[in-house]
Image: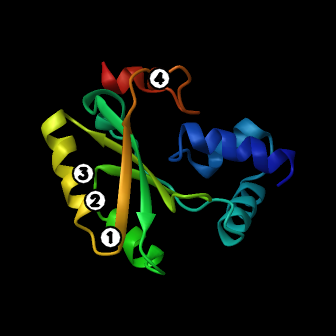
């Protein structure tokens, strides 16, 4: 990715619904160039997709945790697919070392958290887990809740 691609991606990270015309205006390039760059970034896998950021992602899911998952044998792909279907699992990362996967989990309350942990532990192919609750966020993600103040109120 060159500087123009990085600037384009930066704008899209903050508002993935920006029109091609608005992007072209902000970047001071043609709409055709924006469209070509976006197509190339999608085709090359640099942009994997676009998503909606829900109010729940910022305000209504106070229970957050990181769960380390040990996979039994060669079951990583089916386990990851099953984990991906759980709405409480916000991200799945592969890793090295003792653990095979790292999960980012978010729920509304401890009862829902306990429920999702129980469902995770019952997934065929999971040999073990270790979970740590996140207590304080000292550095927030690239897109901050302040970016959505008009939506969140």
Q: Quadrant of the N terminus?
A: bottom right
Find disc 1 in the rendering and name its residue.
82
Q: In whole angstroms, how far apart are the C-alphas of marks 4 and 2? A: 23 Å
- In the image: residue 107, left or right of residue 134: left
Work out which residue is located at the far bottom of the displayed protein and give it. 74
Q: In whole angstroms, how far apart are the C-alphas of marks 3 and 1? A: 13 Å
Q: Please give the label number shown on residue 86.
A: 2
Query: In terms of depth relative to the viewer, which is nearer, 44 or 139?
Result: 139
Find disc 3 in the rendering and name its residue.
117
- In the image: residue 75, left or right of residue 40: left
Image coordinates of residue 24 in percent, x first then y, are: 71, 45
Scheme of colours in the image: rainbow
Q: Identify the residue at horizontal 54%, vertical 32% (top origin).
A: 143
What SS does tag 1 mark?
Answer: helix
Q: Identify the residue at horizontal 35%, vertical 45% (top origin).
A: 105
Image coordinates of residue 109 in percent, x first then y, are: 18, 33
Pointers 2 and 1 in contact (C-beta within 8 Å): yes
What SS does tag 2 mark?
Answer: loop
């Amino acid at each position: 990715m060159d500087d123009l691609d990085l600037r384009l991606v930066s704008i899209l990270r903050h508002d993935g619904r920006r029109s091609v015309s608005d992007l072209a205006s902000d970047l001071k390039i043609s709409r055709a160039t924006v469209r070509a760059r976006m197509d190339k970034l999608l085709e090359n896998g640099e942009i994997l997709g676009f998503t909606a950021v829900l109010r729940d992602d910022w305000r209504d899911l106070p229970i957050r945790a990181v769960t380390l998952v040990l996979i039994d044998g060669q079951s990583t792909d089916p386990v990851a697919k099953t984990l991906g279907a759980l709405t409480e699992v916000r991200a799945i990362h592969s890793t090295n070392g003792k653990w095979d996967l790292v999960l980012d989990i978010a729920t509304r309350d401890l009862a829902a958290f306990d429920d999702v942990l129980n469902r995770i532990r019952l997934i065929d192919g999971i040999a073990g887990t270790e979970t740590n609750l996140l207590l304080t966020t000292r550095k927030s993600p690239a897109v901050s809740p302040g970016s959505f103040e008009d939506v969140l109120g």
